[in-house]
Image (spheres, grey):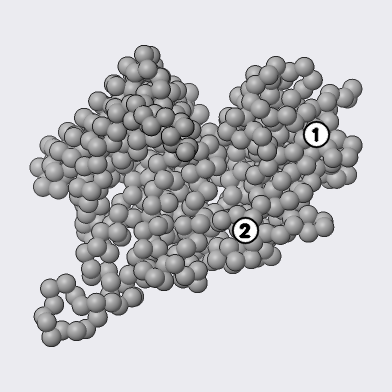
Amino acid sequence: MTYKAPVDEIVFALNSEAGFDRLIQSGAYPDLSDDLVDAILDEAAKFADNVVAPLSWEGDQTGARLEADGVKVPESFKGAYQKYVEGGWSTLAAPQAYGGQGLPLALSNAVTEMMNSNIGFQLCPMLSNGGMEALAAHASDEQKETYLHKVVSGEWSATMNLTEPHAGSDVGNIRAQAEPRDDGSYLIRGTKIYITYGDHDMAENIVHLVLARTPGAPEGTKGISLFLVPKYLVNDDGSLGARNDVACIGLEEKLGIHASPTCVMAFGENDGAVGWLVGAENRGMACMFTMMNNARLHVGLQGVGVAERATQHALAYAVERKQGRAPGAAKDDNEAVPIINHPDVRRMLMTMRTMTEAARAICYENAVVADLAHAMGDEAARAKYDLLTPVSKAFSTDIANEVAALGAQVHGGMGFIEETGAAQHIRDARILTIYEGTNGIQAIDLVGRKLPLGNGEVVRGYIGEMRETAEMCRQSNHPVLTQTASELGHALDALEEATDWLLERSKSAPLDTLAGATPYLRLFGLAAGGHYLARGAMAATQDAALDPAFVTRKLASIRFFGANMLTACSGLSAAVMAGNDVVDDIGLEALAG
């Protein structure tokens, strides 16, 4: 399962589709230049190709294990993680004040996509990045000085502890308790489940960010606070002290991501786990959402990473595997040809390629506008970041599952056999639509919270931006792009109609908006994907320095995407506007019976 980081595709998506040059021109990143970006991406590609990606299969087959003294990951992962830390890969977008490089999230995320060639490994740094962001935004100065330097460097990792056996998506039901002590600390008691890298032996300490309730706290999410609970207590001089009363008491047996330990964590089974309040009491959800928004975009990038690897895997097999005569061959020509010559196989491969490209571009612009919002205080960029985040997470992970399944289909019967590795992509991708907020919740967030932003003007502004792309395609007089203009225009008509309907129904019939949320997010993702691929194709035709074969590839991508994906938008719009009646018509008893 050889992987080669698609540096040319990544650079093109950043510059020609996601508008990365806005960050260079902003002046917010004085050291940022095209040369620096190229150097970082080239080195990241070498690291991903030679260190991280080759361990994916071993990690899948070996998995993590729980022993008497804690969780052990595959030995090779420990070595790879140390190289990751030594290479400074965890520091790219971290604050300079705490040892980071202060580079854009968009650049860091491009690197992250490559590392997601092995998501069982990359999940540990991903959670640490989210913890880093939450601590930087909400921790006290003392907490930052004690913990943030080490998390930034990667010497210590971080986790996010929300879920309990009775409190999954409904976080307001958590029961973990935080008892205040005279010295300002708290004793944390409770059980958390599904904690990614809740324990491991790659880093010397783990900083757990834990949601819990203080005595007398209000019910629901308004009574939740966030606490910092280290695996090892930290002495005044910064050295590690005694082991805290926190332990992994079980590992989940999972469908995929076997190398990533998914832990059942016990806090305070003996004397109580010592922790410290992060931010204000009863404001834990606001603090945690800083981490979760970061994680949702990163999970979208996991989808891109899995989809890219599955696509490369399927392409390599399709070129090598010979079956059947060439279409249109003479009757006496019985020579078998590589299956990539068969139109249906090519259709599957083009679906895989173009959906991956679309998801990549959405995630990349999402990161660019996040940077503009953070570094420049750009409120329009902040609103666009909010709008795109659920789409990045849900659309990218939905297509990752589809692409992985198509990859196995390209392999035929061998796709069902574990040794080919095609099945691993399916197993690893399956969790992506579930954790960090299920894709159904992302869709509800999109229609319930993000469409009403600015009384609907944020989403209308984005649709207007996409219409400008369609108009530029129309004016190009390029035969492929003028066809794209028509297809993208019809897709945007469908999106606009569904958007207006949802905004109107949200006031009078909220169940209709909930029922239409998932098809709407799909519609939004396809239209946005078409917008970015069209933008890229236009840029490619205007860049004389590009390899002609690359330009041909970009034109082929938007031509295929327009004919096969954008044409689905009208049907999705109809599904959105079918309302709740078609969902609820059968009744609960009949549905369950």
Viewer-proximal residue among 90 and 400: 400
Q: Which residue is mark 1?
A: 189
**Residue 4: image location, x then y, percent:** 43, 63
Viewer-proximal residue among 123 and 251: 251
In the figure, 327 relative to 358: above or below? below
Going by the numbered disc 1, the residue's amino acid type is: Arg
Q: Which SS class for mark 2? A: loop
Residue 429 numbered tag: none
Q: Which residue is mark 2?
A: 259
**Residue 203: image location, x then y, percent:** 72, 52
Q: Quadrant of residue 320?
A: bottom left
**Residue 68: image location, x then y, percent:** 82, 57
Circle 2 Cα neighbour tier, 10 Å, few/some/many (<14 / 14–19 / ≥20): many
Residue drawn at x 85%, y 45% as measured from the top left: 243
3D distance between C-alphas at marks 1 and 2: 28 Å
Left or right, 282 with reference to 40: right
Left or right, 112 with reference to 514: right
Residue drawn at x 49%, y 51% as measured from the top left: 430
Going by the numbered disc 2, the residue's amino acid type is: Ala
